[in-house]
């Protein structure tokens, strides 16, 4: 009798492991599908941003007095987001009033549907 019970417990444990493995497999499969969809969507957005950047790069640099431009992820309140953006590098961030006085247009929130982000990179060397 005892042997039969142990055999049944082993079968139950084996079935339980099979169910758990199937559940883990389903979770992993779902995760990979979602991950692939996100990566594919990000690739599309990056490709679109690249096309927009090629189309507007000269205009952006001249009209908005931008030193360099590129593609990256937008930073909001000091934290990087998952939003692909056109990154505009300027020597100094300026207020709307300062830009108006200098006759420089303000960089729009987005260009052709792609958000922009302004990053300050001072020129020259900073003494220590």
Image (cartoon, rainbow, N blue to C red):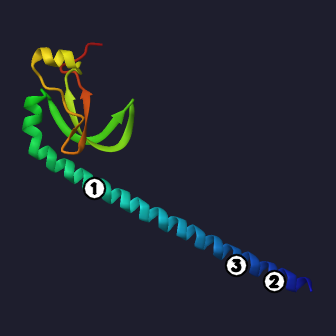
Element carrying mark 1? helix
Instruction: Decide which of tag 2 and tag 1 comes sooner along the chain.
Output: 2
Give the numbered dot on residue 43: 1
Quadrant of image for the N terminus: bottom right
Task: Give residue 60's quadrant in the image.
Answer: top left
Left or right of residue 51, residue 119 in this image: right
Task: Give residue 9's quadrant in the image.
Answer: bottom right
Left or right of residue 122, residue 39 in this image: right
x and y, in percent, of residue 91 in the image: 19, 22
x and y, in percent, of residue 5 in the image: 86, 82
What residue is drawn where x is 24% and y is 50%?
A: 46
Q: Circle 2 is placed at which residue position?
A: 7
Element carrying mark 2? helix
What residue is drawn where x is 31% and y is 38%?
A: 74
Q: Nearer the viewer, residue 90 or 108?
A: 108
Instruction: Decide which of tag 3 and tag 2 comes sooner along the chain.
Output: 2
What residue is drawn where x is 12% and y is 22%?
A: 104
Left or right of residue 23, residue 9 in this image: right
Between label 2 and label 1, give the one nearer the viewer.
1
Give the numbered dot on residue 15: 3
The CA distance from mark 2 to mark 1 is 53 Å
The CA distance from mark 1 to mark 3 is 42 Å
- Vertical comparison of 37 with 106: above or below: below
């Amino acid at each position: 009798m005892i042997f039969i019970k142990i055999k049944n417990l082993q079968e139950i444990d084996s079935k339980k492991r099979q169910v758990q493995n199937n559940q883990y497999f389903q979770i992993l499969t779902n995760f990979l599908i979602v991950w692939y969809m996100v990566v594919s969507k990000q690739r599309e957005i990056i490709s679109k941003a690249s096309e927009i950047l090629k189309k507007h790069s000269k205009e952006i640099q001249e009209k908005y007095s931008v030193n360099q431009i590129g593609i990256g992820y937008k930073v909001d309140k000091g934290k990087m987001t998952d939003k692909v953006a056109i990154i505009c590098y300027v020597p100094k961030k300026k207020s709307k009033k300062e830009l108006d006085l200098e006759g420089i247009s303000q960089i729009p929130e987005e260009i052709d549907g792609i958000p922009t982000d302004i990053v300050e990179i001072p020129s020259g060397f900073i003494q220590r």
